[in-house]
Image: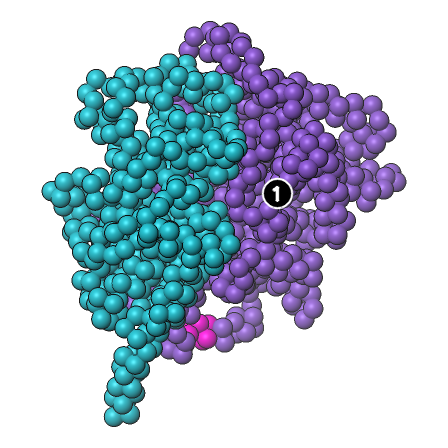
Chain colours: A purple, B cyan
Amino acid sequence: MSAAATLLQFLNGLAAASSLFLLAAGLSLIFGVSRIVNFAHGSLYMLGMYLAVWLSARAGYWPSVAIAAAGVAGAAALIEMLVLRRLYKAPELLQLLATFALVLLIRDLALWAWGPEDMLGPRAPGFRDAVTIAGSRFPTYDLLLIVLGPLVFFFLHILLRRTRWGTLVRAATEDREMASALGVNQRWLFTAVFALGGLLAGLGGALAIPREPANLEIDLEIISDAFVVVVVGGLGSIPGAFLAALVIGEVKAFCIGLGYSKITLAVEFIVMALVLVVRPWGLLGKPMALARGAATVELPLGRLESKTALAALPIVVVLLLAPLVTGQYTVVLLTDIIVFALFAVSLHFMMGPGGLVSFGHAAYFGLGAYGAALLLLRAQWPMETALVAAPLFALAGAVVFGWFSVRLSGVYMAMLTLAFAQIAWSVAFQWDGVTGGSNGLIGVWPASWLASKSAYYYLALLLCGGCIAALWKVLDAPFGYSVRATRDSPLRAEAIGIDVRRTRWLAFIAAGTFAGVAGAVYAFSKGSISPETLSVPRSVDALVMVLLGGVQTLTGPAWGAALFTWLADALSREFAYWRAAIGGVVLILVLVFPRGIAGYARERFGK
Amino acid sequence: MRLLMLIAALACGSALGQPIKIGELNSYKVFPAFLEPYKKGWQLAVEEINAKGGVNGRKLEVVSRDDGGTPGDAVRVAEELISREKADVLMGTFASNVGLAVANLAGQRRIVFLAAEPLTDKIVWQDGNAYTFRLRPSTYMQVAMLVPEAAKLKKRRWAIVYPNYEYGQSATESFKRLLKAAQPDVEFVAEQAPPLGKIDAGSVVQALADAKPDAIFSSLFAADLQKFVREGNTRGLFANRTVFNLLGGEPEYLDPLKDETPEGWWVTGYPWQYLQTPEHKRFLDAYQKRWNDYPRQGSVVGYTAMYAIAEGVRKAGSTRADSLIGALSGLKMESPFGPITWRAIDHQSTMGAYVGQLAKKNGRGVMVNWRYADGARYQPSDAEVRKLRKQ
């Protein structure tokens, strides 16, 4: 690269960093104070874009930026008051499920309100053109962004450091319970922080429209970027987010400038993985205060006693008889449900009793699926051996990724698992010669004796059912209790001789391997696989299933998987706006059954 | 005995005007901009066909489903259409990975599948099967339509930008191969492969400009294309450079550009305003009357795909898979773009595309200097196709 090119890519990186910072600052604030992993932050940003494009045709661009930001702030405040406020007492991460429902609702709302076509906004008045820098033309609007990012940062800095309100926010970020005990009204603090976060998201979206069109995919496309910036910077740290945005913006610009554009598919996740391995709390983050309450007071899971097992007998009988009395499609759907039940149960194994949250559990599901396909198609193994050996791929992945992940805790660990999953995804996506690239691999069919849907269903039932039973059994074995001990009190567990890190690592490996079993069974039931099997949405599906069923119950995740899969199937047939329908149903379930459906049943009908 | 009578009754029923059931599946909520017009297209076709009494005395009945946009979900939905809805034939899909997965299932379950939208070459070549037919001109065909225009310019230094997934990769690969064959002294000086939907347009435009190309070949579309065009316009990337953009003239991708439309670009697309052939006039009038909107590329695809199934069943005289395959192979039919043939050799239709240049008119993008590129003329040799299509 010439000196001029280097300078220009550096400026491009700065402009990108400003947009990233605007996007991430609000998310970081919200997380810092409320500990909510807000999946809907990208949706708020998208809402800001649509509002700004729509309004700028009526009120002009600059007023529309202000109105859009204010409008999104209002929407965020409403969301906090109507939905999230009811969930602060619920088990950790349940708010995540609510924000997931909001993503679905807001996307369909935007489709309904503004139609399917992308909406390219106007250029910003006063900043339409370019100036010549080092012989190249550089947009004046990008220069404006380069100034605006630090300006917003400065404003936030003053707000947080020099005002009473800012002091309260910082106090709550550092220790929420202590702030509350000292008489800070959390309710209004949370609403205000949420509104401010929404304001920043709306502002970021509105300021993005001179550079990119409002479109319906943007919400999920940018949410992972936002998380990366927040986590790399350190959760809740605004200067950290600023620094991280700078690093990622520049790294991307120079990857492109140097001709390595293909790596931009995953480069931010590679950066995040590196940072988290070296600095477990991000660049400028601090170790989180231990959340008092929540997980530590959870009742131990009921053990699977013979009485309970007996109660499960009718279900087993129904499942065994299903192919004889129902249509073929029901069998296909049941196969999916059983596969996802194992997928959800395997996630729950580490997430519920172990307290090890993974945002990238699909990596192991996908590794199992790819393992099956590769052994069958590339190594020409018989289907049966491929199916049995495929989970070893997931096991290998879990051994490596888990070793790094269990060194971290809480959301940092979850984000590291997400980073690994994205890296695995981008390998599957780009390695054309082996994985078939974005198209994936087709022709992954079971052996002829399993070709009928019923035969394959029985195989899936046997394998997945057996694995689910095994996982539940392990939770009641000494290993399961030591896993639980590492969650409830790592210090005491260490003191009585449990190797905490090793126990967590083993739990991670077990969960990953069993997810791999689910993935392998899935691959042969579909006849094809593509990178989508290890993508973020699939990981989110697993989280949704676990949370829907009840994270602090034993059988909940299986019920959650059944309910979610059935809902998705039934609603997509009945409603044009089926995503909104799913979102609505999930939202209602969250509000009515904050402990999950199985958790509710346990509370209501005893143990 | 009673079972026999029942079977006989059912058989009679199908002959005596049982509807022809078409299982349609597509990613309606993932790609609504393309698929809402597509749905209107096939709905119009169904209404027209049924108003004329259907096919062989049987009406068309479409069971339409959202496939969720992922191969796994799409395969489940297709299973539902096959086993619960008892569809006679499958149609639809958009993304290539979903199309390939459903095509493979169709081969396994022995049901005819008309892949309407997917562009991947593999669905009719490397991964093709007897049961799968594809309507739209493939990535290879559309690239081949642009290459003669590119070769005419005699530009030496080319830069390439494409979305980093199979469509962009194979478009780039075909373009480089075909242009090199037509113009051996060509040089490819830069290649940028931003992730689909996430182009860092400023950096990409700068990197392309730094390579000082004479011409650019792009296969970007949708939001990526809009970002690229706006940055390129502001930064002067397109001044004194010829740009080729696959699919850039399709209304779905051209219309959002409005006054940003870059003039002079060579594109493949659909200049619906200017087509004066009687077959297109008839389609345009019917579409505008029915939907009070103008057709997009997707509308033509949906409309023609439905007619293809109807024509196939008419010629076959039944909906049995093997006779339908026989009927569709080599079938000649009308389309809004003129007559098309379903090639027996690889089950690809010869539907073409319009090649032309972009221009601005009243603040909107349009295509000018266009001509119809008949898909039959932009195919590799039969020997090559046979080699690719192993089975």
Count up the numbered dots.
Answer: 1
Q: Secondary structure at mark 1?
A: helix
The span picked out in magenta is: A316-322
Identify the residue at image location x=39%, y=42%.
Answer: B274
The single residue placed furthest to the bottom in the displayed view is: B1
Q: Is residue B95 above or below residue B247?
A: below
In the rendered structure, does residue B295 fall within the stretch colored magenta? no
Instruction: Give residue A432's position: percent from left, percent from top.
Output: 30, 37
Identify the residue at image location x=27%, y=79%.
Answer: B15
The single residue placed furthest to the left in the displayed view is: B383
Identify the residue at image location x=61%, y=42%.
Answer: A43
- Which quarter of the rendering shows the C terminus of chain A? bottom right
Task: Characterize the local packing of mark 1: few (<14), some (14-19) or many (20 or more) Cα atoms within 10 angstroms.
Answer: many
Q: Is residue B110 visible?
A: no
Instruction: Give residue A160's position: percent from left, percent from top.
Output: 78, 27
Q: Quadrant of residue B237?
A: top left
Dominant secondary-structure state across the stretch colored magenta: helix
Instruction: Give residue A572's position: percent from left, percent from top.
Output: 50, 61
Q: Is residue A270 above or below residue A457?
A: above
Q: Residue under circle 1? A: A43
Q: Is residue B300 visible?
A: yes
The one nearer the camera, B238 or B47, is B47
